[in-house]
Amino acid sequence: MRMARAVNERLVRSGCEYDIVAHPHSATSLESARVASIPAERLAKSVILDDQHGHYLMAVIPANRHLDLSKVQVTGDWQIAQESRLPHLFGDCERGAIPALGDAYGMDMWLDPALTRQSEVYLEAGNHNYLIHMNMDQYLKLVPHAQVRELSKS
């Protein structure tokens, strides 16, 4: 599987230009950047949050940064979702390889400006061996409902 079904459908519908980057198996976003020889600040890392009332939010930050929960909680009682709850949300993805495409999975998405300032972006394809690469304009076209908000710290 080169990419998750929902990711492929979203890319086809959007008409965005992209390419696929194959890399050795990796377990984390930061490791994916390292083994794919790409700058970690250009790899979009998805962190799924929940409010314990059945609402989910995808926070997307560069792989070399950490989510600052205090910046997210200003708008509600968000916390990092339990890993055990994620398979039903991302059934077409390998565990831990969540694509930074909230719309494709029916959830709101917030993007950190540290990522949007990059000229290009890489995102998980839904597995641990492939990344999707595109320029930032194409990515923003792919996620038109994403809100840009300060989310991370170094």
Image (cartoon, rainbow, N blue to C red):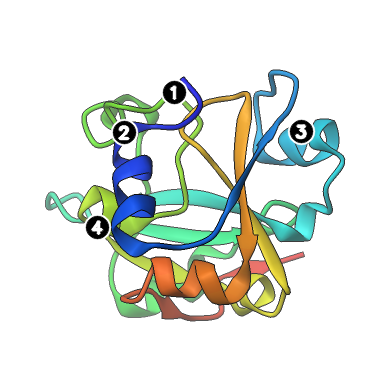
Q: Earlier in the sequence, mark 1 or mark 4?
A: 1
The crowding category of the residue bearing disc 2, from other C-alpha atoms within 10 Å (few below 14, some 14 to 19, many at least 20), is some
The crowding category of the residue bearing disc 4, from other C-alpha atoms within 10 Å (few below 14, some 14 to 19, many at least 20), is some
Q: Mark 1 sits on what residue?
A: 95
Q: Earlier in the sequence, mark 4 or mark 2?
A: 2
In the rendered image, residue 60, in percent from the top left (x then y), is placed at: 51, 60
Residue situated in front as seen by the camera: 144 or 14? 14
Q: Earlier in the sequence, mark 4 or mark 3?
A: 3
Label 1 – label 4 distance at C-alpha: 18 Å
Which amino acid type is marked by label 3?
A: Glu
Question: Callout 1: helix, strand or loop?
Answer: loop
Asked if residue 26 lies left or right of residue 113, the reply is: right
Which amino acid type is marked by label 1?
A: Arg
Q: Mark 3 sits on what residue?
A: 31
Residue situated in front as seen by the camera: 46 or 92? 92
Identified at 66% across, 39% down, the residue is 29
Q: Quadrant of residue 33?
A: top right
- Residues at badges 2 and 1 in contact (C-beta under 8 Å)? no
Label 3 – label 1 distance at C-alpha: 15 Å
Question: Callout 3: helix, strand or loop?
Answer: helix
The crowding category of the residue bearing disc 3, from other C-alpha atoms within 10 Å (few below 14, some 14 to 19, many at least 20), is some
Q: Mark 4 sits on what residue?
A: 107
Which amino acid type is marked by label 4?
A: Met
- Residues at badges 4 and 3 in contact (C-beta under 8 Å)? no
**Residue 5 - label:** 2
In the rendered image, residue 49, in percent from the top left (x then y), is placed at: 36, 52
Identified at 73% across, 59% down, the residue is 42
Identified at 28% across, 59% down, the residue is 103
Viewer-side label of 4, 2: 2
